[in-house]
Image: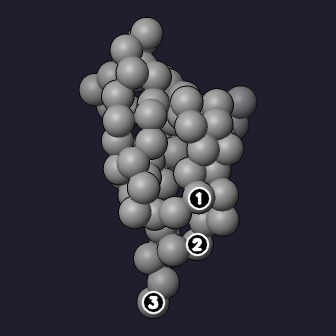
Amino acid sequence: MTEKSDEFKVIPPTTKVLCPEKGEGWTLTGITGIDEHTSVMFQGVRYTLPAKLIVDELLPNYLESHKNS
């Protein structure tokens, strides 16, 4: 069985994400590998997060919240 994080190709900068605690944000840098750390902006504050967290949780959260928009 393949994990979700093994299925992505490249995530470009400015990809929108959603964190339950911090709200909606976007990537400041692109993601090309699951073991990277990526800068993400939430409400004017920059965070450095593991790519795995973004790919497995924050990006799917955003996509799910905007599914019927």
How dense is the environment of label 3, judged by Cα within 10 Å: few (below 14), some, or many (20 and up)? Answer: few
SS for callout 1: loop
Q: Residue furthest left?
A: 21
The image position of residue 66, as x and y in percent, is 63, 34
The image position of residue 30, as x and y in percent, is 60, 44
Residue drawn at point x = 42 percent, y = 55 percent: 36
First-in-chain label (3 vs 2):
3
Residue drawn at point x = 28 percent, y = 26 percent: 21
Residue 54 in the figure: left or right of residue 32? left
Q: Quadrant of the C terminus?
A: top right
SS for callout 3: loop
Q: Nearer the viewer, residue 2 or 9?
A: 9
Compute the Cα span from label 3 to label 1.
22 Å
How dense is the environment of label 1, judged by Cα within 10 Å: few (below 14), some, or many (20 and up)? Answer: some
Residue 23 higher or lower than 17, as above or below: above
Task: Give the quarter of the image for residue 16.
Answer: top right
Q: Nearer the viewer, mark 3 or mark 1?
A: 1
Q: Nearer the viewer, residue 37 or 63?
A: 37
Task: Tell me the tag on residue 12.
Answer: none
Residue drawn at point x = 42 percent, y = 11 percent: 43
| Residue type of the residue flagged with mark 1 | Thr
Task: Give the quarter of the image for residue 29.
Answer: top right
Label 1 sits on residue: 32
First-in-chain label (2 vs 1):
2
Residue 18 is at least partly visible in this image? no
Label 2 sits on residue: 7
Label 3 sits on residue: 1
| Residue type of the residue flagged with mark 3 | Met
Residue 10 higher or lower than 46, as above or below: below
